[in-house]
Amino acid sequence: MASSHHLTAWQRVWRPFWSVPLAIGGLAIAAGIVLPLLDRGLSEHVPYLFQGGSDSARGLLSTIATAMISVTGLVFSITMVVLQLASSQFTPRILGDFLAQRTTQVTLGVFIASFVFSLTVLRSVRGGGDIDSFVPQLSVTTAFLLVIASMGCFIAFIHHITVSIQVSNVISGIGDRAVALADDLYPAGAPEPGGTWSPEVGTPSVPVSSGGHHGVVTEIDVEHLADLARELGVVVVAEVGVGDFLTEHMPLATAWGADVLDDAAVGRVRDGFLLETERTMRQDLAFGIRQLVDIAERALSPGINDPTTAVQAVDELHRILRLLVTRRTHTRYVRDADGRVRLVVRPQVVGDLVDLATEEIVHYGRESLQVPRRLAAMADDLLSVSLPDHRAALERLRDAVATPSADAGR
């Protein structure tokens, strides 16, 4: 079976939107505590560092803290409104992609760092009537440099967001990730799926349900499940595939060859399936295709009526499918080092992905002049390069678009 993307424990820590800003803010607080201690070792006045007195330092730090927290709230509030408007026109799922981008996270982190660093350093400034007068020159200068860095991040962020919400970049970004995942899940030169497996009559089995969990299957850890099946001396059959939705206590897998599994073993089987509230494109190629189909459908809706955007989405789907139809669907059966089947999975079949990418667009694009013609041209091109395994799905596509394209041309 082809390799697939799994999140390690370290990657899961950095995955949430708040993790990078929180880490940068934490570093800023630590720096705000440590730098004033270093300042005490400096001479009274160091060239190129802050030369003002305690009142000037307090005023500067207070201004920075007040301004940065205001700018942070304003910029990100407006940004959320812009993204909501953009997502309502394309697809709501692009909002998660935007928030996952490091440019957004680092920008918020630097803004927060400027705020919390200034507040932390402010508590170290002493002057006026204090006997132990102290102005942390290096720390105040660092706060000023953080403001300059914030302005640089702000410019980069504005450029990033304006580019990110352009429809051509949204479609191309989804296509890039989908093509990379397709190349990973369906490698070139993969052998034809061979062999089969089915339980013998009378073989005991233990069903494993989702328990009290619900959500979309976003990951199946093939290596973990295969190793676990070998350890337990069973064959694990996945009853779900990546992208399937499960409610509580729905069938998740079946362990064939065991009369009973203890709670620890059942928990380890469940650990091989990651359920989340939203689909992702780490293993779920159909989700990438689904996003492009959503964009095309919205563009074809009477309220938007933007066939050019629909054609752009079809062109990106063409790019993905042209790679897929030249690759074989990987085998369902995962074997151990001894050649014994240990895991049976449900891969996303290339023919099904072709149907997913085209059926709804054919239906909603029948009245368009451009879309049926583009779909027909795509079908002809894919048939010219496709492996025999996938020709049936492509011929269905060509037959489906033949009549609407002829009607639209009159």
Image (cartoon, helix red, strand yellow):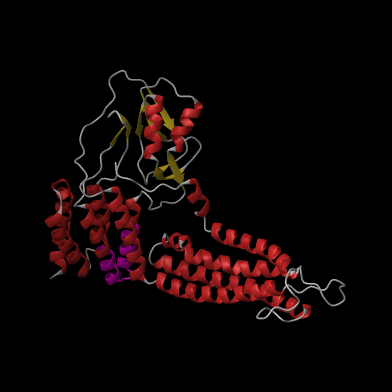
Q: Quadrant of the N terminus?
A: top left
Residue 289 in sight from this viewpoint: no
Which residue is located at x 74 percent, y 68 percent? 41
Task: Tell me how many marks there are.
Answer: 0
Principal SS element in the magenta part? helix
Foreground of the two, 333 or 304:
333
Q: State the residue lying farthest toward the top.
A: 202
The stretch in magenta equals 291-314
Q: Position of residue 260 (x, y in %)?
A: 44, 21
Which residue is located at x 29 percent, y 24 percent? 199
Foreground of the two, 154 or 325:
154
When the figure is inspected, residue 277 is found, relative to residue 95, above or below; the finding is above
Foreground of the two, 274 or 341:
341
Q: Quadrant of the C terminus?
A: bottom left
On the picture, is 190 further left or further right than 82? left
Which residue is located at x 50 percent, y 46 percent? 9
Q: Position of residue 301 (x, y in %)?
A: 32, 66
On the picture, is 302 further left or further right than 70? left
Q: Position of residue 227 (x, y in %)?
A: 39, 32
When the figure is inspected, residue 235 is found, relative to residue 350, above or below; the finding is above
On the picture, is 390 further left or further right than 104? left
Residue 268 in sight from this viewpoint: yes
Query: Residue 48 sits in which quadrant?
Result: bottom right
Q: Position of residue 180 (x, y in %)?
A: 31, 56
Foreground of the two, 2 or 289:
2
Does the magenta portion include 295? yes
Does the magenta portion include 246? no
